[in-house]
Amino acid sequence: MTDATAIKPHERLAAALSDDMEAVGTLIRTRMASEHAPRIPEVTAHLVEAGGKRVRPLLTLAAARLCGYDGGDHIKLAATVEFIHTATLLHDDVVDESAQRRGRPTANLLWDNQSSVLVGDYLFARSFQLMVECGSLRILDILAGAAATIAEGEVLQLTAARNLATTEETYIKVVRGKTAALFEAACKVGGVVADASEDHVAALAEFGDALGVSFQIVDDWLDYGGAGEGIGKNLGDDFREGKLTLPVIRAVARGDAEERAFWKAALEQGKADDLDRARAILARHGTLEETRLEALAWRDRAKAALMRLPESELRGMLADLADYVVARAN
Amino acid sequence: MTDATAIKPHERLAAALSDDMEAVGTLIRTRMASEHAPRIPEVTAHLVEAGGKRVRPLLTLAAARLCGYDGGDHIKLAATVEFIHTATLLHDDVVDESAQRRGRPTANLLWDNQSSVLVGDYLFARSFQLMVECGSLRILDILAGAAATIAEGEVLQLTAARNLATTEETYIKVVRGKTAALFEAACKVGGVVADASEDHVAALAEFGDALGVSFQIVDDWLDYGGAGEGIGKNLGDDFREGKLTLPVIRAVARGDAEERAFWKAALEQGKADDLDRARAILARHGTLEETRLEALAWRDRAKAALMRLPESELRGMLADLADYVVARAN
């Protein structure tokens, strides 16, 4: 399953949904245009065409098709979801003062923070226009709610950073906001647009939520446990940014006075110059391995939710995607 | 009419609509709360309670009442409009690196840019949730379109800054984006929620657009022609930020080689250390006075649009508001 030469599940999904994905790509290019402000498509294209995996629009398309949808609005919803995601990436890179995203310099570095903030706002507004075109108040409600949860999670992450008192409860809220809320909404609107049964809509929402949580937990694992290459982020980024992620929260709770002093200096006071020691402490308390097991548990929940949906080839690919997401932590 | 002791038109509007405005205030406080992230209401309250004139929600309420509305959704729409406005202020202050807003330190200074970006995103998402509750796809379309126009105008302003080649056409697009689009939408949704005739809805939209344009042109006049006190902005801000506003665009077009060199150094190269000379050049070419006359012409358009609406006390107050907006340039 983790054979590097195998076709990855999201690639198989993209192949199975290639006509839809092409239509999404065309729609994105059309709607990111701006008659008046050429800076907008420049900045957007930099990010949109950087070769992201487009997992979120794939989820919307797969969910809609899985529920038997044969209309055209799922294309608009998939583009909506990708626009919301792109807008949050632009704003995140400003907030995190990031220099790299998807292996390329960030927009805030290539242009400026101003462009990233304003182009993000533009994409967010465009995403709402696309949703409105679908004419479903329920879908608008789901995506507006997701947007609020995302922003709330990001603010919570900001205020929880550099604070050793951060709890696991807060951590999960941040994870839900920064990642799972949009995964959940992406899946759910696919079911709603297909007029699926309430049980199927709920199953899709649970799948998206659990997939998103496991995805983010693995991301946080990778920051300490990964090899640092080909994962699109640098080993130790969270450490240097003072983010309290699951392996650290548990290690802090179990640490002795000396370790607590180490974490305090590194995370609260920004003296994060000894990643090796951080990794050694996590290993001693076994919290990296526990974090991996947490991700697996969320993966299992995601797959269990899928089982409530009609059996199909797409459902199998979504299950494989859930496996793939956690297989990155190996 | 410009007697400083007289009750101002927006104050009379607020008094006439005091029950509605109180309900809007309560709704804003309720919806800016965040269970998880206390930073959100802190930042929002700093701005929302700083004593802005709340012109935009007043426009929505007045438009709805003027068209005979007696339901409750205009309260939600007025709060929506104020949330969108507050979100754009938070982002603007990051973009402009402002230190003062409404006579107080800006949120980006009191907290940080990160909080301003993310809390702005949150308010924007909350505004969409409020709109969705009103259940009108047409209203959602109007406000989503306004949000896109605002962001587009801001990006255009960013790319037009420090560029002497900026045209009047670009200037008007920026003005529409940064100010008139939300004034227009605020008025228009008031008519739509009241189920007003298409002619009345169009008249409200025209009124809002023209009022917004005249408001912004006067703002740009004040930056060079004002006394610099009690106007909520510092004389010469636009000059130092290299913004190409109407009086400057016309003066640049008519300037000789020496003047062009002055503008180039000041606006394009950031050597904006001689505001007095800038003011003298504008005076010599008469462009400040022309700018004031432009604002008056837009004021006249705003009042003409109002005449297409049913006569009422509220209509008279809106006409007075249009007069008041331009009377600031005296």
Image (cartoon, coloured by chain):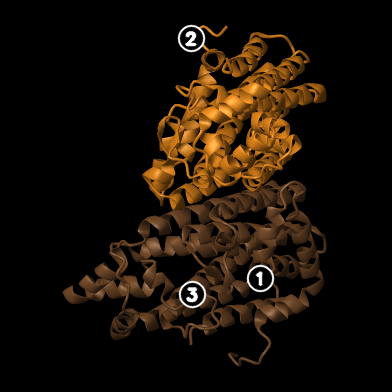
Chain colours: A orange, B brown
Q: Amino acid at mark 2?
A: Ala
Q: Which residue is mark 2?
A: A4
Identify the chain of the residue marked 2, using the numbered disc in the image.
A
Q: Are marks 3 and 1 in contact (CB under 8 Å)?
A: no
Look at the picture and state if A112 lies above or below B267: above
Task: Say which label, 3 or 1, has the lower sequence index.
Answer: 1
Most foreground residue, B323 or A257: A257
Image location of residue B249, percent across then percent down: 32, 70
Q: Is residue B216 visible?
A: yes
Identify the chain of the residue marked 3, using the numbered disc in the image.
B
Look at the picture and state if B31 lies above or below B58: above
Residue A192 relative to residue B262: left or right: right
Q: Amino acid at mark 3?
A: Asp
Q: Which residue is mark 1?
A: B50
Give the tally of numbered discs. 3
Q: Is residue A70 visible?
A: no
Image location of residue B147, percent across then percent down: 57, 53
Q: Are marks 2 and 3 in contact (CB under 8 Å)?
A: no
Crowd band around label 2 with a 10 angstrom C-alpha radius: few (<14), some (14–19), many (20+): few
Q: Nearer the viewer, mark 2 or mark 3?
A: 2
Q: Which residue is mark 3?
A: B219
How far apart are the two marked residues, 3 and 1, measured between alpha carbons? 19 Å
Crowd band around label 3 with a 10 angstrom C-alpha radius: few (<14), some (14–19), many (20+): many
Give the residue displayed 70% in from the left and 36% down from the top: A171
Crowd band around label 1 with a 10 angstrom C-alpha radius: few (<14), some (14–19), many (20+): few
Q: Quadrant of the N terminus of chain B?
A: bottom right
For mark 2, give the secondary structure. Answer: loop
For mark 1, give the secondary structure. Answer: loop
How far apart are the two marked residues, 2 and 1, measured between alpha carbons? 57 Å
Most foreground residue, A206 or A73: A206
